[in-house]
Image: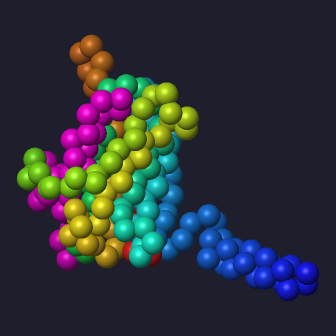
Amino acid sequence: MHVFRLGAGLAAAALLVLTPTGATAASQWFSDAHGDVKSSVDIHRVRLFNGSLQGPAVRVTVVQRELRAGDGFDVWLDTDAADPGPEFRAAWFANSDSLGVRMVESFSDMGQQVACPLFRVRSAQDDPGESSHVFIPRPCLDYPGSVRISVRAQRAFAHTTATDWAPSVLHFYPWVARG
């Protein structure tokens, strides 16, 4: 009886040490300014999970004020600290198409499609949490170490497009080490 309580206590303490704020070295939540975009495409938070031996993928979660069908998303991934620009871009439309992963030289480069059959996106206006989730297996990104990301969300209207960048236009969040 005492051994069980001690074991449970040690397990709980180990979880607190490993995840003091709900994040590990391989996972980081980033905040984006609220209200910097007048439409509901406004990004509120972004999470980058940079895999581990138990989770061999890079995962990104984008939380916005109101997710709608047709919202477009681009996530640029910088996987090489020696090269200041992005090396990859993942793209999709909510409730619609996944455009997959492309190898790019810059933010404006259309790049080349990367074969990534296990690439997955969940982005639907009926999902709870107003969030989109992308799952990119590490081999599709050339097995990166640390990763940093830049995110763009867009919504087309009759004669205009609303756009929000996180953290800001053509900038990255800090590096997240691989777990």
Residue plotted at (37% across, 25% down): 69
Question: Is residue 32 something that shows in the picture?
Answer: no
Q: Residue at x 30, y 61 (%)?
A: 137
36 is higher (above) or lower (below) than 133: above
Residue 177 in the image: x percent, y percent? 40, 75
- Could you say which quadrant of the image residue 58 lies in? bottom left
Q: On the picture, is 117 further left or further right than 36?
A: left
Q: Residue at x 26, y 39 (%)?
A: 98
| Magenta range | 82-109
Tell me what residue is drawn at x 26 percent, y 21 percent: 160
Asked whether the viewer can see residue 136, the reply is: yes
Q: Position of residue 94 (x, y in %)?
A: 35, 32
Place residue 56 in its image quadrant: bottom left
Q: Is residue 66 left or right of residue 141?
A: right
Q: Name the image quarter holding the N terminus.
A: bottom right
Q: Is residue 172 magenta?
A: no
Q: Quadrant of the C terminus?
A: bottom left
Q: Residue furthest front?
A: 1
Residue 140, how many percent across, how many down?
22, 62
Question: Relative to 89, is 70 on the left or the right?
Answer: right
- Dividing the picture into quadrants, the one containing residue 48 is bottom left
Instruction: Name the spot of residue 171 as percent of width and height, x first.
Output: 30, 56
Tell me: residue 85, above or below residue 121: below
